[in-house]
Image: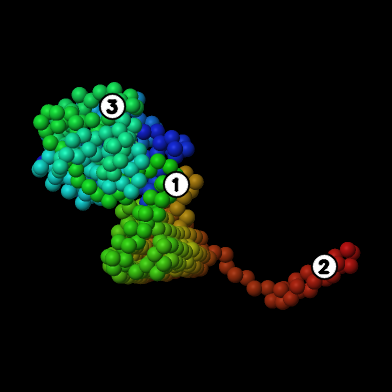
Amino acid sequence: MPTALIVLAAGQGTRMNSELPKVLHPLAGFALFAHALNAGRALQAARTVLVTGHGGAAVAEAARALDPAIVIVEQAEQLGTAHAVAQARAALEGFEGDAVVLYGDTPFVRPETLDEMARARKRHDIVVLGFEAADPGRYGRLVMAANRLERIVEFKDATEAERRLTLCNSGIVMADAAQMFALIEAVKNDNASGEYYLTDIVALANARGLSAGVVTCDERETLGINTRAELAAAEALFQARAREAALENGVTLQAPETVFFALDTVLGRDVTVEPNVVFGPGVTVETGARIRAFSHLESCHVGTGAIVGPFARLRPGAELANDVRVGNFVEIKNARIGDGAKVNHLSYIGDAELGEATNIGAGTVTCNFDGINKHRTVIGRRAFIGSDTMLVAPVKVGDEAMTASGSVITENVPEGALALGRARQVNKPGLARRLFEKFKAARASHEKDN
Ligand code: UD1
Ligand code: CA
């Protein structure tokens, strides 16, 4: 049975006090709404529809960058959750299968929970995700009759007795798409908020002889983000779980509480991560590699046995093959570093390719940018780049070639050649001593005058 995700993300998020739409605030390196999409991915959704409103253009752009197949619909006026879902109707015209409604500001729903809902659909026409709330506050309450869900009552519309119910609505609903839209059509807004409540489809379904059921999950899964404080708490929760998962998967973290992961970080078994390391989005580290203290990695790949840092920065497109060494104060961007190659000290390697076992001396820079365009540097295997070499791209250095330290390399270096690109040294016998005497005399006369 194919599934369609409908992700609601039209709300303003006033309490974030931000120019940025709420669902674009980052959590674990990804916009908030991406987390809901990620959970939904477990259902192998055939279609994903994102309902945007406030800051719609920016949200749409971010969504397309993440998933070009995503369908964006606009809810110009936010008239309630049922009205929001109704905006997806045209986009799902003719779709046969289930629709799952997720909230763009609710990042922690587990794929397993959605799977469980899909299984419960065999018993019920509508499945709602509920949770036992420690403090039910203003959540919608689930009114049960034995094992069936009779209706959902919003806090504002609930009686005192209903408000005492602790089984609450997460907002996540699953039903046959056509049936869901048919029910939504019958939803009215004659309630305390004057909104079209998606929650009303449960009572409507029961009145039509359909059945509704509840799957429950841990309250933390349903955590919605409304404020910066909640966003910070969510980040802390995400990181705590990610650290735990890494340790369980055979990663050594010397100081787990100082290591930060992104939603999609992949670390192989027996990877060691020293203190104060940040993983931005898109990082994969293979088995047995070591990420040393104070390194920052983003959209890069680190091969087996490689050692990175301390104080290294791997920027997007850094591809480190096996047993590579990248040392302190080295920045690598959009560059492939071959097996066993070393870039150990104070270097910038960008838009480049380094062959296996090549050694890059301290302070080497690939001068990749001419102020307008970027250019590539290609270095062969087992080459030796002397310290403080400036490689002015586009330029190539052949296999087993060498550059003299302090060289500015502007022409290709043939295989096996030594390139010298610096002024020849001249020695002036005795001149240093004479200069020192002259300088001392100048200082003495200056001190006497003052
Ligand atoms: C909703 C549920 C409530 C549940 C709670 C869980 C309804 C009527 N109520 O209440 O039972 O306990 O979530 O958090 O569904 N949105 C739109 N367009 C709209 C309205 C909302 O896109 O017109 C989006 C919001 O951006 C948000 C989500 O839908 O992501 C939920 O809306 P919100 O107004 O927060 O619903 P609640 O009143 O909290
Ligand atoms: Ca809410």
Disc sitting over residue 442 in the figure? 2
Residue type beneath disc 2: Ala
x and y percentages locating residue 362 in the rendered image: 49, 67
As measured in the structure, the alpha-carbon distance from the residue carrying label 3 to the one carrying label 2 is 88 Å
- Judging from the image, what secondary structure is the residue with disc 3 in? loop
Q: Does label 1 or label 2 sit earlier along the sequence?
A: 1
Q: How is the image coloured?
A: rainbow
x and y percentages locating residue 260 in the rendered image: 40, 58
Q: Of tags 1 and 2, which is closer to the observer?
A: 1
Please tell me whether residue 278 is drawn above or below residue 444 in the rendered image: above
Q: Left or right of 350: which side holds 74? A: left
Asked whether residue 109 is in view, the answer is no
Please tell me whether residue 119 is drawn above or below residue 308 in the rendered image: above
x and y percentages locating residue 244 in the rendered image: 32, 62
Please tell me whether residue 378 is drawn above or below residue 439 in the rendered image: above
Q: From the Cβ of disc 3, is ligand 1 less than 8 Å away?
A: yes
As measured in the structure, the alpha-carbon distance from the residue carrying label 3 to the one carrying label 1 is 29 Å
Residue type beneath disc 3: Tyr
Q: Which residue is mark 3?
A: 196
